[in-house]
Amino acid sequence: MSFEIDKNKSVEPKYFNSKDNIVSEDDFNDIQKMSKSFNSVFEKHKGKEWNDDIKTEFDLMLKKEFEPDLSQTVDALRVDNKSRKIEVIDTPKNYIEIFQKHVASLMPKVNKNTDITKKYTGSADVLNEYLKDTPLKGLGQEFINIQEKYGVNALFLMSIIHTESNYGETPAKGTKYNLAGLKRAKGGFQQPKSFEESIDNLASTLNRLYIKRGNNTPEKVHHGGYAAAEDWSKKVVKEWDNINKFIYNNKD
């Protein structure tokens, strides 16, 4: 949602991207789409010409859900649509804290029971940005391709690899490319010939030995035998959440 200061210095939601007079998904940003009622109202009106009645219906819907946190009078408040960063001038701190908590509450959440077969639907570019200072630089699309091949969430794969090898900084002992600590059936670590092969091996293993057996959450993978460390799933979920926050804060 785009927020601007009106003449009375109150915070109002405004449509920010109406390039034509037709109701389309591009007319709304991610925060607006987080409204619980958005999909039903949007499906009702998409493809129609904007008019006062339609605008009023969206305004009332958004006002009902968001206004309790954003109706305080402030001296100056602006949210950049791309970064969601807040610029504040002489504003009581508690008003801003309320707003920040509200925005944070809209970010995707993951936990030990999150379904790891639910696909990441974002771009490879933002994953590349996240990985740019690691040995896996440029492999964002590879994670998405492997996700499509085996049905394992790309961010979950990344989170395991972070937990096991810090994105390739410390591959399994005695290996060059083993990102996830996978072992051979006869003992010893697998010896993939590239990082891409290692990512593929990880997703294949998760699909074959865990997902197909009903172990489709971080906790179930953990206790299904993937790792012995007591805090393994906690670490994986924490990194998954870190990636989500980065993606959310770097959306176009």
Image (tube, rainbow, N blue to C red):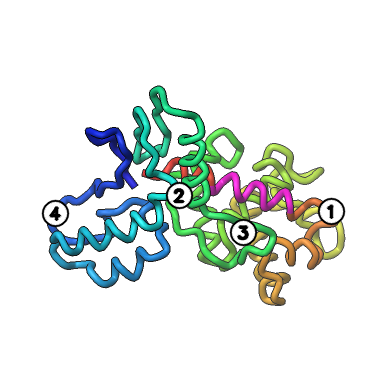
Badge 2 vs badge 1, beta-carbon distance below 8 Å: no
Q: Which residue is mark 4?
A: 20
What amino acid does circle 3 point to?
Answer: Asp
Residue 135 relative to residue 43: left or right:
right
- Horizontal and vertical percent position of residue 53: 17, 63
Upstream in sequence: badge 1 or badge 4: 4
Residue 109 location, quadrant: bottom right
What's the distance in space between the residues labelled 2 and 1, CA to CA?
32 Å
What's the distance in space between the residues labelled 1 and 4, CA to CA?
55 Å
Q: Does residue 24 belong to the magenta stretch?
A: no
Quick one: 212 or 252, which is closer to the camera? 252
Upstream in sequence: badge 2 or badge 3: 2
Q: Decide whether the magenta segment is chiefly helix, strand or loop.
A: helix
| Residue 227 vertical placement versus 3 (above, below) | below
Range of the magenta residues?
A: 234-244
Q: Which residue is mark 1?
A: 230
What's the distance in space between the residues labelled 1 and 3, CA to CA?
26 Å
- Horizontal and vertical percent position of residue 125: 43, 45
Mark 3: which secondary structure?
A: helix
Q: Which residue is mark 3?
A: 200
Mark 2: which secondary structure?
A: helix
Q: Which residue is mark 2?
A: 124
